[in-house]
Image (cartoon, rainbow, N blue to C red):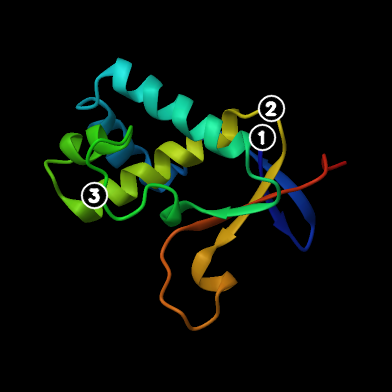
């Protein structure tokens, strides 16, 4: 489960952000279901091993060739920026669907003036 943590407490996130759904839907039509399931499995396995915190852009690394994430690049017509964006949205969806509890914030907010793109995911206790 994914939560936005703010001044008024935690708000559960249940879907991909509305502003990004058109992009997500269009690119997902190009990603074979079997490949998507392989990506979801790899991400869940990755986050099963994360103790506290991880940054989305660090997970796939720089070279996606031969990794479970390569089909994302192909589905995005080998556009690196679109592939990174789609990867982030797939990961977001995975985090929404997980049974454990996670919060998030912008990587830029987390690392100050360093130019790091992505989202920081961190384990939280179950919100009240």
Residue matched to label 3 = 82
Placement of 119 over or under 29, stated as above or below: below
Looking at this view, name the residue that lies furthest to the bottom: 113
Judged from the image, the secondary structure of the residue bearing numbered disc 2 is loop
Mark 3 or 2, nearer chain start: 3
Above or below, 40 against 66 in this view is above
The x and y percentages for residue 24 are: 32, 37
Where is 61 relative to 77, above or below?
Answer: below
Q: Write down the residue under mark 1.
A: 1
Q: Position of 64 compared to 37: left or right?
A: left
In the shown orientation, is residue 100 left or right of residue 94? right
| Snapshot quadrant of residue 45 | top right
Pointer 1 with pointer 2, Cβ within 8 A: yes
Residue at 37 percent across and 38 percent down: it is 21
| Residue 18 on image: x %, y % | 44, 42
Q: Say which mark, if any, is on residue 99.
A: 2
All told, the count of numbered labels is 3
* Secondary structure of residue under mark 1: loop
| Cα distance between the residues tagged 3 and 2 | 28 Å
How far is the residue under mark 3 from the one under mark 1?
A: 25 Å
* Label 1, label 2: how far apart the Cα atoms are: 6 Å
Between residue 46 and residue 84, name the one nearer to us: 46
Q: Are marks 3 and 2 in contact (CB under 8 Å)?
A: no
């Amino acid at each position: 489960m994914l939560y936005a943590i703010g001044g008024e407490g935690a708000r559960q996130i249940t879907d991909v952000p509305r502003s990004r759904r058109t992009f997500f839907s269009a690119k997902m039509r190009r990603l074979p279901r079997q490949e998507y399931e392989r990506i979801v499995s790899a991400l869940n396995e990755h986050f099963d091993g994360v103790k506290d915190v991880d940054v989305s852009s660090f997970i796939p690394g720089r070279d996606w060739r031969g990794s479970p994430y390569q089909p994302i690049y192909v589905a995005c017509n080998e556009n690196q920026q679109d592939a990174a964006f789609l990867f982030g949205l797939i990961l977001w969806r995975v985090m929404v669907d997980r049974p454990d509890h996670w919060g998030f914030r912008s990587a830029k907010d987390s690392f100050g003036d360093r130019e790091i793109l992505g989202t920081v995911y961190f384990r939280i206790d179950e919100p009240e």
